[in-house]
Image: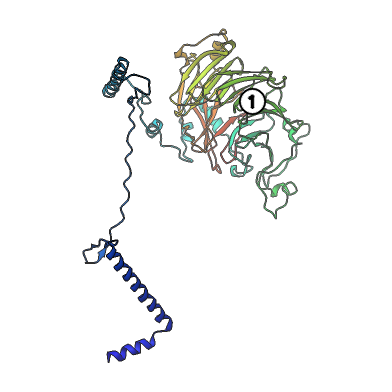
Amino acid sequence: MARARAQISTTEISDYEKQRLANIAERDALLKKLTQEAQQAGLYTKPSVKSTANGASQSHKRQRPVKPVKKERDNAPRRTSSRLAGLTADSEVAKRKADQEYEAVREAERAKRQRIAGDQDLGDILVNGKLSLAVDVINRSGATPYERTFGEDEVKRTTDKELKSIREKISGLALWDAWEPSRIKITPERIYSISFHPTEAKPLVFAGDKLGHLGIVDASQKGPGAKDEGDEEGEEDDRSKIKKIKKEPVQNNNPGDTDPSESDEEEDPFPHVTILKPHQRPISAIHTHASQPQTLYTASYDSSIRGLDLEKSKSTDLYALDDDPISGIDMAATDPHVLYFTTLNGAFGRHDTRIKGRKGAELYQLSEKKIGGFSLHPLMPHYLATASLDRTMRLWDLRKISKKLPTLVGEHTSRLSVSHAAFNSVGQVATSSYDDTIKIHNFGVRGKIDSTRNPTEGLEAMSTWKAGYQLEKERMEPEVVVRHNNQTGRWVTILRPQWQRSPQDGIQKLCIGNMNRFVDVYSADGKQLAQLGGGGITAVPAVAVFHPTRDWVTAGTASGKLCLWM
């Protein structure tokens, strides 16, 4: 009966299945034969099998390799070969050398165990990591987008009538609503510098980006759907001098779209933006002299300074270094022909633009590390304030040059690097630092600095200083210290305080970007006047600046977008 069932099952197997079973049998026979031959030759070892609780066999799990323990490097003096040093064995010199090495090792071990007496700065005893991380956790919770630290409640609680009036005025500045900030792309890349044209007729903004592009926006243009009331006859505007420059929208149009210049203004979703490329590397600074509003000066990391004539639509190469990125430029209000500049290699220079080439330039090495920002005193341009990576803010006097350096009036050292040093029109210097502070220096003038009066005492004190005058260390200490999150990271441009150059109301004000996507405005005594924001701001407006005279504030983001409050 069993034989009959086997025959029936055999007849049901297909030819393909028969061939497969035959191949399996042939393979098993071959493996068995090879195993027997290996056992006879002593080359085969039976693999170990681990039994589980159910009786099934289980192979060993592959163990992870043990990570090698990194040994700490011994900083003690190492023994050296007397033969290689040219010393005779068992000589007095060799013995003296061995004794010195032994004493050095003992002294190093003794220093490790010795107790340190007296007060200590945390920076001096920091072994590893960043001290600012621990301090930041205590003082603040980091950047939180759209979380206000100053608003309407603080303005309402202000008891001083004059201060409250100023806060209401600055906080009342409205974001330019002709377009959303996300649509006002003034440059293709991250904005490094931004500036207003000094004209008061209309807001004209210039911005320089990471790749050397210069963007120009006329904020008097009408947005989509706005009615054009017509231009007033006889009105002259300095910004009309850029009409010869070809305007190009930043955004690329779709292949099937028409040219924005040919379409109706109401159908154009983007503002008209003029984009130039005068440099090949980041534009670090933009400046316009009040007596020559038709010329725009730009400095770049490509080691050059150029002058853009808006009237002639021509960019002129004014000065260039071999390989020394320029970090900033400034000009004296009384001299429109001399450019002052600093470099990332720590140099300061001045150049007369009436002299071609480098013959009209003077260079001074003021720091071993980069100078991130500087400014001249607006009314006494022989005074210069520099901010450096070496953690110092220094005040210099250009009237007296000794040992190829200007006279160092004084310096103040911060815990971390100082990003910028900005003079206002009354002689105060504001700095921002990576120790998360904004400091305002009055250089010893105390008691008369407030947000409602013009602090001329500082100006009078500096005017009495003779050439070569030096300040005591105590007078270089800041009068005001404001806590402010300056940790920009890698992708946000460094935060720098910028004063209003010539405020019409006589009240000294500065603005600086806020990591929570606002722009903060402070008075000369460190009181916050406003925190400017609005809908549509999708990135940190890191590069912020005041209009020289009007209460207008503009700021640029890492995505090349423009924010404007008027």
Along the line of sight, the residue nearer the viewer: 154 or 160: 154
Q: Tell me residue 382's x, y (percent).
A: 60, 14
The scheme the figure's colours follow is rainbow
Residue highlighted by disc 1: 321
Give percent across and percent down for residue 486: 48, 32
Secondary structure under tag 1 reads loop
Q: Which of 336 and 345 is in front in this view?
A: 345
- Rendered location of residue 517, percent (x, y): 51, 38
Classify residue 213 as left or right of residue 105. right
> Which quadrant of the figure has residue 244?
top right
Residue type indicated by callout 1: Leu
Can I make out residue 391 in this image? yes
For the N terminus, which image quadrant?
bottom left
Is 76 left, or right, of 269 in this rendering? left
The residue positioned 39% from the left and 76% from the top of the image is 23
Task: Looking at this view, name the residue that lies furthest to the right.
Answer: 234
Which quarter of the rendering shows the C terminus?
top right
Q: What x and y, as percent, mark residue 75? A: 34, 27
Q: Can residue 478 be seen in this view?
A: no
The image shows residue 27, relative to residue 456, as above or below, that is below
Picture mark count? 1
Taking 212 as reference, is 156 left or right? left
Q: Nearer the viewer, residue 114 or 394?
A: 114
Q: How crowded is mark 1: few (under 14 residues within 10 Å), some or many (20 or more)?
A: few
Task: Give the residue drawn at x 23%, y 63%.
Answer: 52
Would residue 27 be found to the left or right of residue 272 on screen? left
Q: Nearer the viewer, residue 114 or 486?
A: 114
- The residue sitting at 32% across, 36% down in the picture is 71
Does residue 16 lie above or below 35 as drawn? below
Q: Quadrant of residue 292?
A: top right
